[in-house]
């Protein structure tokens, strides 16, 4: 088994663990990256883990993933509800796409109930805390036609 999964994170996730811990928890984005790196390695995969507050940077990483990745896991954060441009970029990617949200967006403000990214996503993890990234990675292994170990 081999391949690379891009894990992309949108605005303000660089503050994970510091910003609104009552909603997002105390784990940092570095903790999430370390957990995902370990899990991916256990299954013969590598990850490219990125965060940006800039929409164009996320789009550039999606374009890069078109050439090098077996799948994309994306937590677009606030861009979830606003970015047709990210949706358009994801629509150019031929592999599986999974959308992750740390909180349950459906229990929050009504504007968070709509996701442009969900129009492309093959699955959505919401409300599982930072464990949603690991669950998405396990699902990505299956969607990419690879069989996860011990699952």
Image (tube, helix red, strand yellow):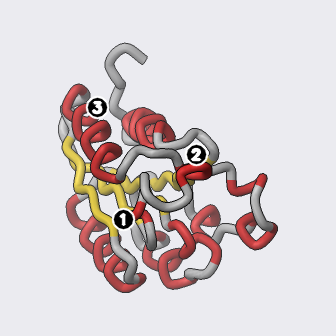
Q: Residue at x 57, y 64 (%)?
A: 120
In the picture of the structure, the residue carrying the numbered disc 3 is 39
Earlier in the chain: of badge 2 and badge 1, it is: 1
Q: Position of residue 26 (x, y in %)?
A: 45, 45
Q: Is disc 2 in contact with disc 3, using a CB cutoff of under 8 Å? A: no
Residue 41 in the figure: left or right of residue 101: left
Regarding mark 2 in the picture, which secondary structure is present there?
A: strand
In space, the residues marked 2 and 3 are separated at their CA atoms by 17 Å
Which of the pair 140/20 is nearer the observer? 20
In the picture of the structure, the residue carrying the numbered disc 1 is 14
> Against 135, is 66 above or below?
below
Q: Is disc 1 in contact with disc 3, using a CB cutoff of under 8 Å? A: no
Quarter where residue 81 is shown: bottom right
> Against 95, is 45 above or below?
above
In the picture of the structure, the residue carrying the numbered disc 2 is 125
Is residue 48 at all visible to an observer of this figure?
Answer: yes
Q: Position of residue 7 (x, y in %)?
A: 34, 55
What is the quadrant of the N terminus in the image? top left
């Amino acid at each position: 088994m081999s391949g690379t999964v891009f894990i992309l994170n949108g605005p303000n996730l660089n503050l994970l663990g510091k910003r609104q811990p009552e909603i997002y928890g105390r784990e940092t984005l570095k903790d999430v990256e370390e957990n995902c790196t370990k899990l991916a390695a256990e299954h013969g995969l590598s990850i490219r883990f990125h965060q940006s507050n800039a929409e164009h940077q996320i789009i550039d990483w999606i374009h890069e993933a078109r050439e090098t990745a077996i799948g994309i896991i994306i937590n677009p954060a606030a861009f979830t509800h606003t970015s047709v441009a990210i949706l358009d970029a994801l629509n150019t990617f031929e592999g599986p796409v999974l959308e992750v949200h740390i909180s349950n967006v459906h229990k929050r403000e009504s504007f968070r109930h709509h996701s442009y990214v969900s129009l492309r996503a093959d699955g959505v993890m919401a409300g599982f805390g930072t464990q949603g990234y690991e669950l998405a990675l396990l699902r990505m292994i299956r969607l990419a036609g690879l069989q996860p170990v011990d699952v």
